[in-house]
Image: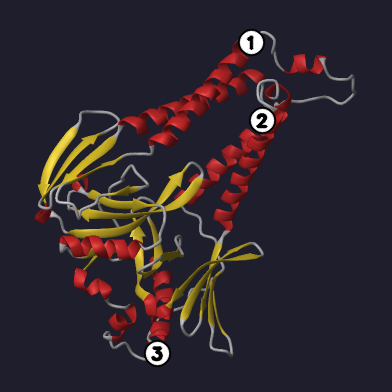
Amino acid sequence: MILDDCDHYSYNFALKISDKTTKATDRFSRSVTIMAFVLGIMFISFGIYLLTNSNLSGIADIENHLPKTNIKIHSFVSPNVFNCIIILIGLMVVGFCFIMFIRYNKIQFDGNYVKVKKRPAFGQIQTFEEPLYNYSGVRLRVNFYQFGILTLNKYIIELYHKDKNKIIPLYISLRKKNIRQIWKEYATVLHMPGITISERGMVSRNFQDLNRNYEEVVTKWHMPQNFIFELDKPSYITFKKRQTGEKMIKIGKIFVDTASVLYTFLTFTLVCMLIIAFFHHDSLIKYINNQVLLTIYAFTFALIIFSAINLMSKDILLLTKDKIIVFRKILFLRIRDSIIDIKHIKGVDINYTPTTERYYLSIVSDKSMVTIGNKLPAEDLRWIRAVLISEIIGN
């Protein structure tokens, strides 16, 4: 599936359209950019100092101060290579900060027209003015956002245009709380349809229909009693029913895609950096306080564990008579993620993220949005969706 998409810079943005004339700037956080820039300069300075300081000539100098021993000390990477790696990492961080700092989208809205000034990282500043009636609606989508080695969900509400360069953000957040309610409010104020991206393309809904519960919507479909048996259950999904009436859906397979490979590479790079730093610990403590260095080690190790958890996590759904409970299973540990009251569900949709080419199932209420199966094929997500619909209508 190929759909036009647009990447916005901010992860915390809101355009207050209730005002007659409103302005907002879509850009990456300046405070985060400045902190990252300082960190990059520190890496560069530290690497240059190690290269140019005659007092540090490598592992041989360290050995001169060590007690005599028959055990040979080896280094996986020569000191000069290690210093160059530090400088290279610093240059990459500084370059990234430069790009994040200078690019932005300045947006102005007066109720009838949208005026935008775009400053890209490279090239000329672009401006355009577009009437509101040329936009198709208010789109809600979830973008899997890479924040360092962390993969987060970025919830985006935007004015959708057929020309992806004219798509305008209205609200961006890393928090899913009340996201559907906010989406509904934007669509209502603008008197425009609400749009989502499904596995079959764009889905448009009248803003007046966004208040209807999903149970009311699916009941009008008049689906046959045993419609779920028309779909084949995927072999890697376990479906169990207890005597108490509770049902459990367990996904027993870890899917690997392009995004997972990139995520694994970033984690591997972090592991290598930690190992290199460990073998050069004696050199590092001469310039960095030992407690600070141990804190960095601990933080980096925690990030590695978090990355491994993200790669190995599996989804489990527990369906009761009135609730859907979502768990994330990591090895032998089961963590409860969300609880949604069935009567409060406003949508169960298979959505598509063009940036990662992933499908996922979203269970939406006015107060929250739960995503599951973000690596599963669309046809397998249809089976899970059918089970949820069956529970919602009481089959």
Q: Classify 10 Å Cα crowding around label 1: few (below 14), some (14-19), many (20 and above).
A: few
In the rendering, at what x and y percent does residue 298 appear?
66, 41
Q: How is the image coloured?
A: secondary structure
Q: Is residue 391 above or below residue 358?
A: below
Please report whichever mark, 1 or 3, sits nearer to the chain's N-terminal start: 1
Please report whichever mark, 3 or 2, sits nearer to the chain's N-terminal start: 3
In front: 127, or 383?
A: 127
In-image side of 33 versus 293 (left or right): left
**Which numbered marker is on residue 102?**
none
Kindly indicate the quadrant of the structure image that contains residue 370. Answer: bottom left
- In whole angstroms, how far apart are the C-alphas of marks 3 and 2? 60 Å
Q: Is residue 154 above or below residue 229?
A: above
Residue at 50% over, 82% down: 320
**Which numbered marker is on residue 226?**
3
Q: Classify 10 Å Cα crowding around label 2: few (below 14), some (14-19), many (20 and above).
A: some
In front: 78, or 348?
A: 348
In front: 86, or 24?
A: 24
Q: Is residue 205 above or below residue 72?
A: below
> Disc 3 vs disc 2: which is toward the camera?
2
Disc 2 marks which amino acid? Ala
Q: Classify 10 Å Cα crowding around label 3: few (below 14), some (14-19), many (20 and above).
A: few
- In whole angstroms, how far apart are the C-alphas of marks 1 and 3? 76 Å
Can you identify the residue that label 1 sits on?
Answer: 53
Name the element at disc 1: loop
